[in-house]
Image (tube, helix red, strand yellow):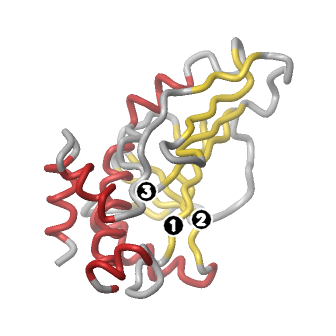
Amino acid sequence: MRLLTLKIQEPLPGLVYPEMAVDHGPDEAARRYRAVAVTTLRQLRGLADTRFRLSVEPSDAHEAVRFWLLPRLAEKWQAGDGFFRTNGWEIDFGGNAGPFEIQASGEILCPFLGSRWVHTALLGLGRTTHQVIGPAIGGGEYFRAHAPDSPAELETRILPELPVIQTSEHWQQALDSALGPALKKAWEEEA
């Protein structure tokens, strides 16, 4: 089992996408944030043998995020011991690192990070490479994974750069890309 942690901000107006809020208002910025987060998670659906951990900020907002997010990802969820499961998903909202052979973190604002991309990135992790790093266009990272029990002397694999949506320009570029219809659909659902 693998663990993929994604940080998510409670998507309230005035708390997310400050640059977009200046251009389009805080309500529209929050709507776009929610659309990007939902699109990213939908892109990751079906990632086999993976638990998604949503690290919610602020820390007391996990219930609000859960009630907003889970119905947008699937109609029915089964609650387990600290996690929620449905076809193609296993999500928790915090916990220990546990017995996960691979631990990864992803950027919730990078909807180009899909399940096939992650699966391919993780091939050989722990056997031929110690860690995988995905640099974001413009700085930062959209993905990082490591196998805690693998020898540290194994090589690090660097993935191609991907964009992270932070500004109105990034938003428009994503809408103009192949991902545009999925992002637009999520944006319309957030109306």
Query: 90 or 103: nearer the eye?
Result: 103
Q: For the point 34% across and 85% down, which residue is it?
A: 26
Q: Position of residue 178 (x, y in %)?
A: 19, 39
Callout 1–callout 2 Cβ contact below 8 Å: yes
**Could you tell whether 95 is left or right of 35 in the image?**
right
In x, y percent, where is residue 112? 36, 42
Which residue is disc 1 drawn over?
8
Closer to viewer: mark 3 or mark 2: 3
- Identify whether 153 is placed above or below 171: above
Q: Is residue 86 above or below residue 47?
A: below
- At mark 3, the secondary structure is loop
Give how far across and how far down residue 79 sits, in percent.
47, 64
The residue labelled by disc 3 is 109
Disc 3 marks a residue whose amino acid type is: Leu
Kindly identify which residue carries mark 2: 55
Hey, which quadrant is residue 133 in on the image? Answer: top right
- Measure how far apart labels 1 and 3 are at the Cα level: 9 Å
Whether 15 is drawn above or below 126: the answer is below
**Eye-nearest disc, 1 or 3:** 3
| Distance of label 3 from label 2 (alpha carbons) | 14 Å
Pick whichever, 59 or 107, lies toward us: 107
User: What residue is rendered at 26% in x and 80% in y?
Assistant: 24
Label 2 crowding class (10 Å Cα cut-off): few <14, some 14-19, many 20+? some
